[in-house]
Amino acid sequence: MGTVTPFPLPRGAPTQIGFERLELNRILDLYGRMVAAGHWRDYAIQLGHDAAVFAAFRRAAERPEFRIEKRPALRNRQGMWSLIGEHDGVLKRGHELGPVLAPVERRLMKIVEG
C-alpha cells in the first residue's frame, strides 16, 4: 500500500520543461509590481519539451512586451535564461535568473519614478 510505482515513459521521450517554485515566485513578484505600476495587464505561461516561457503583455490582444525563457539545453553554453523583447530580439542571456530580469527591474524603477 505504501509503494509508489513511477509512470513508465518511453525511452528517449522528452520531458516537459517547467519553472521551479522559487523561479516562478521571482517572475510573478516582478509581474505583480509591473501590474501595480499600471504597465502590464496580462501574462501567459507555455510549458513545452524544449523550453518554459513566461510572457508579459501590456494588453491581452497584442504581442508580449517581454518573454522570459528557460531552456535547460543551453545551460552549459550561454545560459538557460533569456529575456526576449517585443520584436523577438534577445535582450539578455545568462546562467542566473536575477541578472536576466535586471533590465525589466530598471524599467520598473523608471516607471515608478516618472
Image: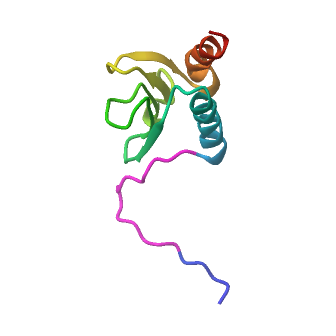
Seen from the viewer's position, the closer of residues 96 and 60 is: 60
Judge whether 96 appears above or below 1 on screen.
above
Residue drawn at x 43%, y 29% is 58
Whether residue 8 appears in magenta in the rendering, the answer is: yes
Judge whether 81 appears above or below 42 on screen.
above
The quadrant of the image that shows the C terminus is top right
Residue drawn at x 39%, y 66% is 9
Quadrant in the rendering for residue 19: top right
Seen from the viewer's position, the closer of residues 58 and 65 is: 58
Is residue 73 found left or right of 2 in the rendered image? Answer: left
Is residue 102 found left or right of 49 in the rendered image? Answer: right
Residue 78 at x, y percent in the picture: 48, 20
Figure coloring: rainbow
The residue positioned farthest toward the bottom in the image shown? 1
Residue 33 at x, y percent in the picture: 64, 30
Whether residue 35 appears in magenta in the rendering, the answer is: no
Segment colored magenta: 6-19
Q: How many marks?
A: 0
Residue drawn at x 56%, y 19% is 104
Is residue 45 found left or right of 20 in the rendered image? Answer: left
Residue 74 at x, y percent in the picture: 45, 29
Magenta residues, dominant SS class:
loop
The quadrant of the image that shows the N terminus is bottom right
Residue 68 at x, y percent in the picture: 48, 30
